Image (cartoon, rainbow, N blue to C red):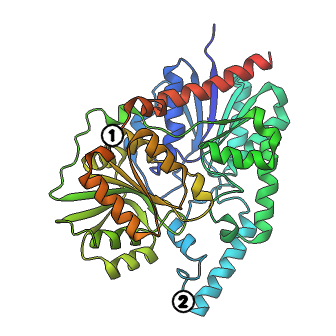
Amino acid sequence: MSKDKLLMIVNEFPPTGASSVQRPLKFAKYAVKAGWEVHIIAPKKPVRKVLDYSLLQEIPPETKVYRVAGLGIKNPEENKMVDANFEDTAPQSKIIKAFWRFLKLINDFLFPYDKQIGWMPFAYWKTVKLINKYKIRNIYITAYPYSAFLVGIALKKKYKDSIFWIADYRDSWQFGPLLDKMVLPFRFKKICRTDDRVLVTCDAAVFVTPESRNIYLHKHPWLDKKSYYIPNGYDEDDFEGVIPKKFDCLTFVYMGKLTRVYGNPISLLEALKECNLPKYQVIHIGSISAAFLQDIQRIDKGVYKFCGYKNHREAISYILGADINLIFLNDDPISTFSFTGKLFELLRAGKPILAMGPKKCIIEDLLKETGAGKYAWIKDKDQIKMKINELLTDTSSFSIQTDIIKQYSRAETCKTLLSIYERGQISNS
């Protein structure tokens, strides 16, 4: 009997080094381990400035990777684009502000979905060739970029029930954080129409949290029978042989982005100043908007240390060596239902977690369930201070449940993904 075959269309793939590459990379890795024949279509050139060539070593040698050229445009620096959309972080000059608004109009007109739309026709034609050559039925397309889903729509029109297409929403599209403020109204309407068409066309839709799935179900109850929850997770292999980084003082580590969309660290820094702690530091691995960095520098006395991007294993050494690992979420309704991509690696690291975000959040529930840390409203400095003191002085407040965390291993989440294809095969046989 021949192997099951899976064709993955993945725009953000190693050597691109953003956290977004981890989910499809691990799906590919564990699909191969499960005996599947995996084909991957990815851009010839990385689509982001952040690169991590060490991730190339994680692509199974049995995997067939096709690097396809195209007209996609490398994504600009996200922090600058986000800041320009909000009054408190936008350029103060009226001339520069008017220029940004003009650029925004042109951008929303030329790129109604995202700047990788020019790569998608090339990915489509390559996909058609591979389907015809290898008789592939199972198709996996992940977004962001959401324009990747256009390939799925076109493939379904051509092949109909001959293919089984899963649309993997790493983030909600039309319900994304602050999306209505980030794009102009005409573009927002187009996104909603196209997103709805994706859901009608795909054979299955996968979401990273139960709540993000429920948001879509509230709008489209008929999605219930073909939508699934598959969380992000951690890969046990990533921790093998990694030596925890040693620090010479009490150390808080944050791994991720800091922008208007992802949360503001100011309340934490102010709370730490009032905790009467001995020498301490806050280490940030990832990226930060210039506006936030300026705010931090105004109140910080040298405890915040921005380290930029680190390769994946080095970043893990930081979270393994931390006294407390940090999570920041924005204080908005969408973040109430968000799991950050790094959450599950932090759970696996086994160090106390302090998460901050909206008043209510599903992360708080998960931290209670796993015993992995504490949660505070990101705008409540006193509550943050209280949670820090609890983690540092009350050992009973941290009692991690390793058995619960194992369900979030990448091996387990991949099994769930493959089972959807297997059920689709049976239902259409």
Residue 18 place in picture, x, y as percent: 47, 51
Label 1 vs label 2, nearer the camera: 1
Residue 405 place in picture, x, y as percent: 43, 34
x 76%, y 58%: residue: 191
Identify which amino acid the numbered label 1 is placed on. Ser
Residue 418 place in picture, x, y as percent: 61, 25
Q: Nearer the viewer, residue 238 or 366?
A: 366
Local packing at callout 1 (Cα closer than 10 Å; few below 14, some 14-19, many 20+) is some
Residue 192 place in picture, x, y as percent: 78, 57
Whether residue 14 is visible to the viewer of this picture, yes or no, is no
Q: CA distance from mark 1 to mark 2?
A: 48 Å
Q: Which residue is mark 1?
A: 399
Q: Is residue 381 above or below residue 426?
A: below
Splitting the image into 4 quarters, where does residue 345 fall?
Answer: top left
Left or right of 299 in this view: 93: right
Q: Which residue is mark 2?
A: 92
Identify which amino acid the numbered label 2 is placed on. Gln
Query: Which image quarter holds the C terminus?
Result: top right
x 30%, y 53%: residue: 391
